[in-house]
Structures are given as structure tokens and as C-alpha cells.
Image: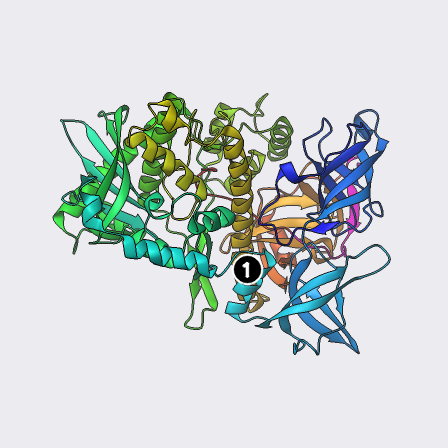
């Protein structure tokens, strides 16, 4: 058994394979805090994830690669679940954890953050590490936990006092094993590249666009600007869109120290007020950033449109550009809404053309079947000490949609180019929703009532989202649709992109922060230089096997980055709510389980759990499959999509949990059944108030599908 701590990513190629046997399953283990778990097979099996009951998991923890034996096969609809037991742990997913050091009597232990280990890790060397109770530490396991013994480990790093904003961020960095800072050979190569750079020499080899009106539009706190926009009107009713992307491949040569480090990182990671970049900042925030007033190298995609936003043709070039103005989304949104004071006339005129063209493209793509989810987000408000003091709704002005439409068009144009000339490349694929996920979504819709389609295809999804727009259940429905979708990933397979209704789609527009974009830029370079026309030039094209491996790695690093970004944001919101215990907030029911009701707070957009002990006194029938809880004595029914006024009852920072309460006075606002609820033992679990503690779950979502 070996640890994966020094490996930046798992690869299916490295999984130990066993002889084909119907009663053996190899896969990743996911453990629930109540003792049971699931083995996710690789490759998938006909019965899906394998259920591991309590006591049958040996000492496996979440993330371990295991071998399981099928111990029980169900028969018939009521007993169709297949159960198993873990017989071997092939590889540990992780052996280092971050948590709080505590002392009880003479015993020192670490309470690990997150949900992988829910029992203390015993440590015997706390004094030798000079750590104090209440410190945030990194502990490496020497003994993994089992059903009859606790985990044991040693403190290998003391991060600082728990609760400090910087320590929260550092703890997440260590928890996810992110690479930071850069090794010295990588920094040395970056400095060498900068010394050799000569813009005048490059300008002679490229199309010079410094005289064009070009702008960047990014968030307020952005520092790495990798895309810029220009628009001309070459003929009456026509547009020529120019999408100019920082030419990172010029500075990061394939196989060098910079390239190898970027491949290991896979992507940049964006935390609140802290970034772990894929490339050293002397490049990502310097020569590769399309800064206002500075000549910069770019790879440009030119797309010509008719008056209806239909593409007429494309052109591709290496260019030199100079951003005329650096705009924020808020500034661009205000300008589009009519507030043009203080901006140059040529910039406001460009924004007008951008708005008109983006609306035409959006209308065309929606007609083609693009799915847009309405899942708002919040921005954190900080004080001078970097503590979160409030949240505010994320800016949702049309300026965001402008950039989204233009980036999607450029990504699609480059993917179509590579497909047309027959060059294997790394695509951004998004398969159709799996059958089981569609079935779950249909079951969810039955809970809400209303017409149920026979199959949840693209057209049905679009009609469903339109039917709930502006209604109280809109958020729950949009979230359910998101959860029904497959996860987008990188692959050379010609699968297409479901959410975007695109047959050919790749990532090209963010090479500063995504390694797949950099890989595609190198193919773009070969095309522009005419090297893909002959056999010799095509020998430089990565094979499908190499592309598949890069895709697996980058898909993994992307998921890890997104999980860490969500977790730190939730952690900071929970610290804010920790200071607001007892406050009342509006929420919406997003889930029902035998533990309680999951409610998302509308203001903070985090999920909390109303445990049954915190419901008003009644006999409660819990219909999990029906998505509702029914009070027998009062005839009250609370279901998914219902709006509730809830109270913040408790916060568990380590477990990332929020406990909510439903006061007596909140019940009158909930719809009543009209009669006492009948007992249905086959479908419900009857609970009196006073359930048991359990860790909750967090919501997730995106504003623009799964681009």
C-alpha cells in the first residue's frame, strides 16, 4: 500500500487491475460519516456504485482506491441494491490532514477539517512541534483509523492560530496539496524568457493591431488579463469580432521547466483575495497579461457575422495588440445602461457594438438549444483585516454575458478549425445527462407537481427552466437540473457539449490560467505558420493517447480547484454567520432526508440543515422520495421549493456545517395539507422532534451552465 501524497493527480492508467471477475470491483471509495460508503467502479459497472454497509469497509477512507467483493445481490425492485465489502486497499488517497490541535486531559489530538475523517487523530508529539491548543496544524497519519482504533499521526507543520483569515486560506492550500510557491528552476526560466523578449522583433512577424480600439473586461480585482475584444463593421449590417488571447505559448516553450510546472498545476486557483497561479506572476501578471496601454503578443480569432448574428467566416492570426482601456464588468455594465461619462467616445462606441452583437449571438445560441441556468452567486465583503463582514449579490449585468458569448464563439471556432483540418486536439466535452440522473430529475419534478415529460431531453429542460423563471421554486429546479447533468471534462473524444448545444468545442481563451488552452495554442501556432499542411509538421501534433492523459489530469486538477474554492468561500461565510447566531433569514427548501430539511439561505447562498429536533413540536412524517415533511397534528406540509423563515442556530467550522431552526411562528406561512396526514409506513419514517446530529451538505451551482 502506498500513499499518493507526492502525486499531483490520479490516473486510471495507474490503477492496479485484477482478473475479470463478476464478484470483484476496483474503484474509489467514498465514505459517509454514519459508517457506510460507496465504491465508484473504474470502469463503471452495470449496477453503478457499490454500496458498502457499516463494518464492511475495513479501514478505508474517502479517496482510497480499493478492491471490493460483492457480498449480496438484491432481487426484484425492492431489493435491487448490490452490497459489497472491501477486501483490499490498493492505494491511499491521502495521508495528510489539516485541523485544529486540541488537548483533553493529557491527550493531544487533531480534529481534521472537512468530512473525510470525523474522529480525532491522536498525536503524541504536540510539544516537540511547539504547537499550542487552538493552532491550525498539518498532521501526517502513521496509522489509519478502523472500526476499533483511532487514527494516529505526527504534526509536520504548524500553520498558525485557527480563525485567522490567512490561516484559513493556508489551511485549504495544505488540505488540497496544492503546489505553492514555484520551484526556483521555474522562476529562473521565467526570468530568462523575460530577458530574451524583444517586442520590436516580434512585431515584424505579426499582424499589428495596435491602432485598433481594443478593450479588456474583467472582475474588479483581476490582475491577469488574458482576453481582449475588438469589433469592426466591415459592411452595412455586418460585424467582425476580434477575440485576442494572450500568446502564452510564445513564452512557455513545450517541455521546459515552466511547461512542466504548468502541466502539474493544470490551472490557476482563485481564492478570495489570494491566487495560486498556473504560471509565475512575472508572466501571468506581467508580459502575458493584456494590460492597458502596453503592446502585447496575442493569438487572434476573427469571426464575421451577418445582421442576424450568423457566422459568415473565420480568420486566425498571430498579432500584436495594445489594450485601449481596461474595464471592469461593473463599468462596462453601467456604460451599456447609458452612463458613459468619463469614458472615451471610441470606447463607448465599441461597447455599443459589443452589446448589439452579443445579443444577436445569444438569441441564435438559445434558439439552437443552449441551456442557461439561473443560479446566482454572492461576493464577499471584507474589512481592512481581510475578515468577511458581509456579502452582496454578484454583479449580473449584461457585460458578463457579452464576454461569455464572445469567448464561447472563439472556443467553438478554433475547435471547428482543428476538426476541419483533421488535427486531434483536446476538447471540452459535456455529455448528455446520464439515464439515472434523468430519472432522479423526473422524480424530483413529481415532488413539485405539474406536468412531467416522458424523457428529460434538452427541449424538456429548456421548457422546464422557462416555466419556473421568477417563481419561488426556481432556485431548487435550476439546482436539480445542474445536478442531473454530467460533469464537463477534457478529452480528445468527439462528444460535443450538451449545455452549449455545440458539436465541436474546446478551451482556447484562457491560456494564463488553464493548461488545456496552452496545449491548443501550440496547435494554433502550427496552423498559422502553415506547418500542418505537410506530414513533417503533423508529427509535432500530440497523439490521442497523450491528449487523453493530459485531459484526465487537467479534469482532475480543475475539480480539485473548484472544490477548494467553494470550500474556502463557504468557510468564510460560516465564520460570518458564526457572529450572527440567532438572526432570522429567508431560505428555500432544497432537499429532504431522514436527518432533516436542507434549506439554502437566499442572502448567503449556503445550505443549512434543520434537524428534526429543531422543528416545532409535532409528529413528523418524512417522505424522502416525495421530498416533503408532514406534521400530523397541525396538518402542515413542508416540501422542496417552499420558502421558509429560519433562524441561524449553530455553526461547525471544522465540519463546514450550518444548523438552522424553524421557529413556531414560521409554520403559518407554510402550506397546510388540509387534513391530518395519514400514516404510510411503506414510504415514510415517523419522527418526533429531537433527531440526531449529522453533517450537512453545501449547495453548488453556476450561472452559465457548465461551460
Residue span colored magenta: 679-696
Name the chief secondary structure element in magenta: loop
* Residue at the (65%, 76%) spot, across then down: 131
Residue with the mark numbered 1: 173
Q: Position of residue 296 (x, y in %)?
A: 24, 49
Residue 339 percent coordinates (x, y): 20, 51
Magenta stretch contains residue 691: yes
Viewer can see residue 161: no
Label 1's element?
helix
Where residue 336 appears, as percent x and y from the top left, is: 24, 45
Residue positioned 50% across, 29% down in the render: 544
Q: Is residue 84 above or below residue 585?
A: above
Q: Is residue 381 magenta?
A: no
Instruction: Count the labels in the image.
Output: 1
Residue 30 can be seen, yes or no: yes
Residue occupying image coordinates x 68% and y 65%? 139
Amino acid at each position: 500500500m502506498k500513499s499518493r501524497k507526492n502525486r499531483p493527480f490520479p490516473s486510471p492508467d495507474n490503477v492496479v487491475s485484477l482478473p475479470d471477475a463478476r464478484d470483484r470491483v476496483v474503484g474509489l471509495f467514498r465514505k459517509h460519516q454514519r459508517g457506510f460508503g460507496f465504491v465508484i467502479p473504474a470502469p463503471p459497472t452495470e449496477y453503478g456504485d457499490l454500496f458498502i454497509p457499516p463494518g464492511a469497509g475495513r479501514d478505508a477512507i474517502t479517496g482510497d482506491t480499493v478492491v471490493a467483493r460483492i457480498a449480496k445481490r438484491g432481487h426484484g425492485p425492492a431489493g435491487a441494491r448490490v452490497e459489497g465489502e472491501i477486501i483490499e486497499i490498493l492505494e491511499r488517497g491521502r495521508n495528510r490532514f489539516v485541523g485544529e490541535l486540541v488537548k483533553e486531559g493529557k491527550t493531544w489530538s487533531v480534529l481534521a477539517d472537512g468530512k473525510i475523517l470525523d474522529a480525532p487523530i491522536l498525536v503524541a508529539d504536540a510539544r516537540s512541534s511547539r504547537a499550542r491548543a487552538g493552532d491550525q496544524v498539518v498532521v501526517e497519519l502513521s496509522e489509519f483509523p478502523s472500526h476499533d482504533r483511532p487514527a494516529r499521526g505526527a504534526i509536520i507543520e504548524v500553520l498558525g492560530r485557527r480563525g485567522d483569515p490567512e490561516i484559513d486560506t493556508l489551511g485549504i492550500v495544505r488540505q488540497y496539496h496544492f503546489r505553492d510557491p514555484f520551484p526556483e528552476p521555474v522562476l529562473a526560466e521565467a526570468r530568462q524568457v523575460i530577458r530574451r523578449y524583444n517586442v520590436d522583433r516580434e512585431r515584424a512577424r505579426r499582424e499589428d493591431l495596435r491602432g485598433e480600439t481594443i478593450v479588456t473586461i474583467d472582475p474588479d480585482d483581476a490582475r491577469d488579463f488574458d482576453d481582449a475584444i475588438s469589433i469592426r463593421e466591415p459592411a452595412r449590417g455586418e460585424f467582425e469580432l476580434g477575440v485576442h488571447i494572450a500568446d502564452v505559448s510564445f513564452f512557455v516553450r513545450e517541455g521546459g521547466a515552466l511547461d512542466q510546472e504548468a502541466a502539474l498545476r493544470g490551472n490557476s486557483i482563485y481564492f478570495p483575495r489570494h491566487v495560486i497561479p498556473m504560471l509565475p506572476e512575472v508572466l501571468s501578471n506581467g508580459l502575458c497579461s493584456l494590460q492597458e496601454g502596453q503592446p502585447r503578443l496575442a493569438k487572434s480569432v476573427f469571426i464575421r457575422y451577418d445582421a442576424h448574428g450568423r457566422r459568415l467566416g473565420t480568420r486566425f492570426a498571430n498579432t500584436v495588440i495594445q489594450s485601449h482601456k481596461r474595464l471592469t464588468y461593473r463599468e462596462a455594465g453601467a456604460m451599456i445602461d447609458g452612463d458613459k461619462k468619463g469614458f472615451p467616445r471610441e470606447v463607448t462606441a465599441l461597447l455599443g457594438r459589443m452589446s448589439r452583437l452579443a445579443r444577436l449571438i445569444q438569441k441564435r445560441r438559445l434558439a439552437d438549444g443552449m441551456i442557461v441556468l439561473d443560479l446566482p452567486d454572492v461576493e464577499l465583503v471584507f474589512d481592512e483585516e481581510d475578515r468577511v463582514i458581509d456579502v452582496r449579490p454578484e454583479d449580473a449585468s449584461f457585460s458578463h454575458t457579452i464576454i461569455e458569448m464572445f469567448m464561447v464563439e472563439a472556443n467553438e471556432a478554433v475547435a471547428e478549425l482543428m476538426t476541419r483540418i483533421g488535427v486531434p486536439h483536446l476538447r471540452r466535452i459535456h455529455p448528455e445527462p446520464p439515464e439515472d440522473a434523468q430519472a432522479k430529475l423526473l422524480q424530483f419534478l413529481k415532488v413539485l407537481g405539474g406536468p412531467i415529460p416522458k424523457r428529460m431531453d434538452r427541449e424538456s429542460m429548456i421548457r422546464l427552466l422557462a416555466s419556473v423563471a421568477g417563481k419561488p421554486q426556481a432556485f431548487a429546479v435550476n439546482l436539480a437540473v445542474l445536478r442531473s447533468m454530467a460533469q464537463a471534462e477534457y478529452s480528445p473524444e468527439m462528444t460535443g457539449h450538451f449545455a452549449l448545444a455545440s458539436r465541436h468545442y474546446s478551451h482556447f481563451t484562457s491560456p494564463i490560467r488553464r493548461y488545456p488552452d496552452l496545449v491548443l495554442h501550440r496547435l494554433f501556432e502550427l496552423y498559422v505558420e502553415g506547418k500542418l499542411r505537410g506530414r513533417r509538421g503533423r508529427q509535432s501534433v500530440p497523439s490521442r493517447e497523450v491528449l487523453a492523459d493530459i485531459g484526465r489530469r487537467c479534469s482532475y486538477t480543475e475539480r480539485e480547484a473548484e472544490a477548494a474554492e467553494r470550500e474556502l468561500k463557504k468557510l468564510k461565510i460560516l465564520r460570518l454567520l458564526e457572529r450572527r447566531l440567532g438572526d432570522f433569514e429567508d431560505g428555500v427548501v432544497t432537499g429532504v432526508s431522514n436527518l432533516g430539511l436542507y434549506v439554502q439561505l437566499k442572502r448567503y447562498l449556503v445550505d443549512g440543515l434543520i434537524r428534526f429536533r429543531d422543528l416545532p413540536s409535532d409528529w413528523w412524517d418524512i417522505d424522502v422520495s416525495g421530498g416533503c415533511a408532514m406534521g400530523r397534528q397541525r396538518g402542515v406540509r413542508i416540501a422542496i421549493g417552499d420558502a421558509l423563515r429560519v433562524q441561524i442556530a449553530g455553526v461547525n467550522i471544522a465540519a463546514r456545517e450550518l444548523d438552522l431552526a424553524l421557529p413556531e411562528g414560521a409554520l403559518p406561512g407554510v402550506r397546510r395539507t388540509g387534513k391530518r396526514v395519514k400514516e404510510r409506513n411503506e414510504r415514510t419514517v415517523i419522527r418526533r422532534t429531537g433527531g440526531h446530529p449529522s453533517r450537512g451538505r453545501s449547495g453548488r451551482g453556476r450561472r452559465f451552465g457548465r461551460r
